[in-house]
Image: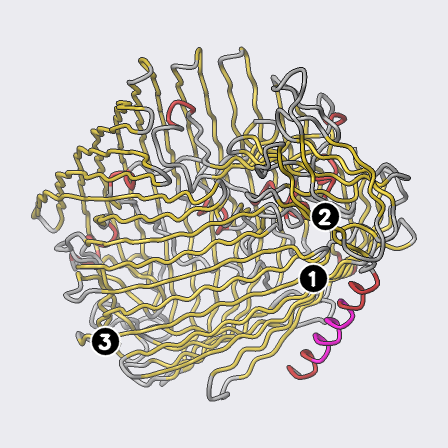
Amino acid sequence: MLKLVLNRYLYLTICLLGVIAVNAQEITLRGVVNDTLGQPLELANVIAIQSVTKAMEGFSITNTKGQYKIVLRANTPYILKVSYLGLKTLEEEVVTSNTDITKHIVLEAHSENLDTVELVYEMPVTFKGDTIVYNTDAFVSGTEKKLGDVLKKLPGLEVNDEGEIEAEGKKVAKVMVEGKDFFDGDSKLAVKNIPADAIDKIEVLRNYNEVSQLSQVTNNQDNVALNILLKEGKKNFWFGEVSAGIGLEERYLVHPKLFYYNPKFSINILTDLNNVGEIPFTIKDYLNFTGGLKSLTEKGGTFFNPSSNNLGITLLQNNKAKAIDTKFGAVNFSYSPTNHWEISGFSIYSYANTQLETESDKSYTATSFQENTNSQTEQNTSLGLIKLSHNFKPNKNFQLDVDTFLKLSNQEENNVLETRSNVTDTITELKTQKPISLKNNLNAYYTHNSKNIFALELQHLYENEDPFYKAIRNIQPFPGVIPSNTEQSNYNINQDRIVTTNKIDSRLDYYFITGPKSNVNFTLGTTFSHQSFNSEIFQILDNQTELNFDTPQLNIDVTYNFSDTFVGFHYKFLTGKFTFTPGITLHQYTTENTQLGTTISNQLVNWSPDVFVNLQLKQSESIRMNYSISREFTDINKLASGYVLTDYNSIYQGDRYLESALYHNVSVNYFSFNMFNFQNIFANVTYNKRIDAFKGNNTIVGINQINSTTNSNFEDDIYSGSVNFQRTFRRIKASFSARVSYSKLNNIVNDTPLLSKSIAQNYKTSVATSFKKAPNVELGYHYIVNNYDNGGQISTFYTNTPFLKLEAVFWNRFLFTADFEYYKYNDKAKTIVNEYNFLDASLVYQKPNSKWEYSAEVTNLLNAKYINQDSFNELFFTTSSYSVQPRYVFFKIKYNL
């Protein structure tokens, strides 16, 4: 099968090359732009406009040597326009032939006003300091539907496999539309929902800082934001789309989306109801959604974040499952009562009913037991997020931000398992939870004068979590731990937990500007956290009464206080092409946990040095190095000595004597973005050494696990590296990415140290065409190798995934798209070989300039039944078969407002 797929892949590659050849009747116009003194001009604009159609067909931005290069049609007359700030614009006629042309250009000084620029044509790409502005019409072909489709065609911008936006190799932290936040804290909603035809320009804001006063005194090299500028016809008017569809087997979908923007008020309304597997908002999205509020704890070199008490609710595999029914609604708004005050926020609601079916085989490394499990799972999940923000800036010297962010959810999972190992058992599981998280921020920034800046940041976090777990088994679970009543028809074991957290962070920064290229930063901060943990394990008897256990670890109350008071000093200075920011922070830590009638207190004083170095080779080329020492403190969930049921055959017990872990972190990044040839390179190398790291201490009896956490006596080492490369060759965009990581971890299994080594390799390459009229194709290959060495037991696994994406317009009104992926998974010995593939296709009909669109779509055209996956850790190796939705065919109508 793989050979057949690879042959087809090669055939399609040849076809792609043929399409390129058909469209290759082109020549290259190149040269150098100088001033009258012979000095090369960097960032000069060179535009080629076809003399007959008056359409811009090519452009270039000169590099540091003044060089430009434009691909043009052969045997065609053009008007060449060259402009540069402060110099006269040159306009000259050029007629191409069948051979490349070299043409050098000299720009003269402007005779009237050196600060005036003659606007001759709107450039596809312009630079405004740290901002890159893309005129999207110069890059799109008109077939794009959403923002994500546009971003994929812009140099330096990508949408990664998780649906998040990356700009020049960095994750985009914020997306705005006309300067207004678009669901702050997540870029995926923008990627999936903003209509492509409403976008006029996209601004990439490099070195971004939301607080203008701090932009010159802090290091913002890794901060990138996106601002979407709308076309004139979309401002002060409602726009969007309303789409609906029906399909075979009672399939349906409804997607109304409305947008309104003016300078004082904006609103976005997104809705989505469907049962065809299109998931607008997943549990993973909910857990990762920050609301744009960052943790203040990590800024001081301390990692203390209360962990979520989720019950291991099963996450979707690649947004696929046996059946999915979703309902989604979201509103985002911004209102400015005055020029100095803005109120903004959003509300998101998501509901999903999900059916999952999984069959898995586990091989336990410590006991040599084999376990086969078949599970049928139903999930009902309601998720809610609300954020309200106030921004008050009466003048350029003062800014006050107040934010409230609320997260709510109601999750229920019913699971029926049949498990076969040395014994056979049928298990019914119920998991429910309704966690609440409320975060409040108050940030004030004041510039006293040109040399003195103050920043005050306060944050309060309240969390209440109530996970409930039930497992009904025919076989007594954990007989040495839970004293179950054995005179019952089954074993109905339950656990109630309540975990609450109140955490306050405060931080005061003072910046003193010591010179035009240097400043010092003094920091004073505190973190205080109070947590409570209440847990009860009980048995429901046949007569429906509760049997409460007297064992302290099965019925426990715990309180835990953590505090960190710290002072820090950093000195930032620029010399030549270098920026140095060395610093050190002094921490006073205090911890106190009370449980089982006693209290344990600890105090620790710790110095945390850090240093940041930036070498700015060119405007868009740099090397950055970060080094820091940090401490991680666990929260109450690992300190509570009570037992926690984590699965039908797994139980966890915390350790109240846990200490902190010490981390050494080093990272080196290289970044280069060249607009001359649209080449983007981002490389990263990191090293992490963990001392006294938190490690799992696992005891295996048959297939049953009793897990705990301890501080390791051995050091862990983790190395990782990645590189991303993009470049445009004429009408072809090529990309390559590689990620390699090596880890050496010391684990404990059955009280015996176990050295675990792993090497993970992930490679992906693709080529994509960007023709205006011809069919466009993207061909790619994804290759993954995972090698595990657990105490001498070595396993190696390979995943091969060729993929193809096709987009073709014909008769000026039909659009055909296809998305194909083929997977082959096998181990080195080829004792496991899994193959499956997915193909989605659509045919869209829309008359030119019509607001109506009609489409026929099919998902999983090849009707794949399941996904095969495998995983490996220090306890067991698992291979699983995961059922996915069958082929769905549906018809859709869309009206563009």
> Counting other residues with Cα less than 10 Å from the Cα at mark 1, is it few (<14), some (14-19), or many (20 or more)?
many
Foreground: 456 or 896? 456
Q: Nearer the viewer, mark 3 or mark 1?
A: 1
Say what secondary structure mark 3 lies in.
Answer: strand
Say what secondary structure mark 1 lies in.
Answer: strand
Foreground: 466 or 91? 91
Segment colored magenta: 7-16
- Would you say residue 14 sits in the magenta stretch? yes
> Counting other residues with Cα less than 10 Å from the Cα at mark 2, is it few (<14), some (14-19), or many (20 or more)?
many
Q: Between disc 3 and disc 1, whose residue precedes? A: 3
Residue denoted by label 1: 778
| Residue 273 visible to an observer of this rendering | no
Residue 786 higher or lower than 197, as above or below = below
Q: Nearer the viewer, mark 3 or mark 2?
A: 2
Say what secondary structure mark 2 lies in.
Answer: strand
Residue 364 higher or lower than 840, as above or below = below
Q: Between disc 1 and disc 2, whose residue precedes? A: 2
Q: Amino acid at mark 2?
A: Ile
Q: Between disc 3 and disc 2, whose residue precedes? A: 2
- Would you say residue 285 sits in the magenta stretch? no
Residue denoted by label 2: 70
Q: Which mark is residue 360?
A: none
Q: Which mark is residue 754?
A: 3
Residue 238 spot, x, y in % from top left: 73, 26
Q: Amino acid at mark 1?
A: Glu
